Image (cartoon, coloured by chain):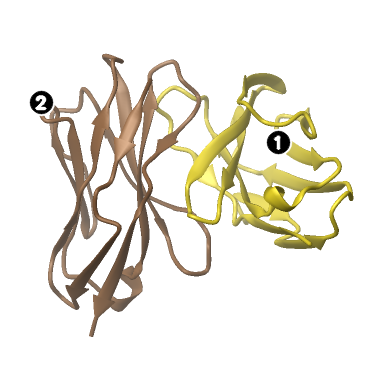
Chain colours: A brown, B yellow
Amino acid sequence: AQKITQTQPGMFVQEKEAVTLDCTYDTSDPSYGLFWYKQPSSGEMIFLIYQGSYDQQNATEGRYSLNFQKARKSANLVISASQLGDSAMYFCAMLGAGSYQLTFGKGTKLSVIP
Amino acid sequence: DTAVSQTPKYLVTQMGNDKSIKCEQNLGHDTMYWYKQDSKKFLKIMFSYNNKELIINETVPNRFSPKSPDKAHLNLHINSLELGDSAVYFCASSPTGYTDTQYFGPGTRLTVL
């Protein structure tokens, strides 16, 4: 069974500062993928970034980077230079190899303060 | 050029009614999904189809029935709606399934009165 834990229900960050959203996972699959999605107040689910378990480098997409520590089973999302539009719910999710279902964490609500 | 679309966006209905939510993707993906997001924002898989074949059927009441007429469409029909069915339902698609990114539709907010 797979499990995703996001321990921060809510976080605040000052505009233009960097912020780290925590995600730990548990799986017995040797191969898996880790994802982050953003859900703004408008409700849609927006894919942000993907990290494969065998990827040697941490994934980056613009202002988003994934701090992947395999031994610690953590996949934290780092948002640099926060913007007001980054205020949203952020979900960490996992997909095991051979599995079709994403397992989601409970999410972290990020609020960016001007 | 919407990638994954759902209709309707909002659905308000009475208990006991039957309703359908439609989903279409124009990404050429093989796999489609239905997820349910409850009032606490928790997302859980309901169903998944790969090339029109049902591959995931989680513990969902049999009042919920997915139908995939072709690879680009996955509809969700709900019979005898109950108050507890109120939620946001998301359709998603991915190229295949294995560690592929899933792209979500805009969601359908279902309210059962």
Find out whether the residues at labels 1 and 2 contact each other: C-beta distance under 8 Å: no
Question: What is the distance, in whole Å, between disc 1 and disc 2 at their CAs?
Answer: 39 Å
Which quadrant is the C terminus of chain B positioned in? bottom right
| Secondary structure beneath label 2 | loop
Pointer 1: what residue? B72
Q: Position of residue B90 (x, y in %)?
A: 60, 47
Which quadrant is the N terminus of chain B positioned in? bottom right
- Nearer the observer: mark 1 or 2; the answer is 2
Q: Residue furthest bottom?
A: A114
Tell me if B71 is positioned left or right of A80 in this view: right
Rendered position, B15 above or below B74: below
Residue situated in front as seen by the camera: B86 or B6: B86
| Secondary structure beneath label 1 | loop
Q: Position of residue B17 (x, y in %)?
A: 89, 50
Q: Quadrant of residue A46?
A: bottom left
Residue situated in front as seen by the camera: B65 or A97: B65
Marker disc for residue A107: none
Tell me if B98 is positioned left or right of A51 in this view: right
Rendered position, B63 above or below A30: below
Q: Amino acid at mark 1?
A: Ala
Q: Position of residue B16 (x, y in %)?
A: 88, 49
Question: On what subunit does the disc labeled 2 rest?
Answer: A
Circle 2 packing at 10 Å, graded few (<14), some (14-19), many (20+), is: few
Circle 1 packing at 10 Å, graded few (<14), some (14-19), many (20+), is: many
Pointer 2: what residue? A71
Residue at point 52%, 38% (across, down): B44
Residue at point 24%, 57% (across, down): A62
Q: Residue furthest right?
A: B17
Question: On what subunit does the disc labeled 1 rest?
Answer: B
Q: Position of residue B10 (x, y in %)?
A: 72, 63
Residue situated in front as seen by the camera: B86 or B4: B86
Q: Amino acid at mark 2?
A: Ala
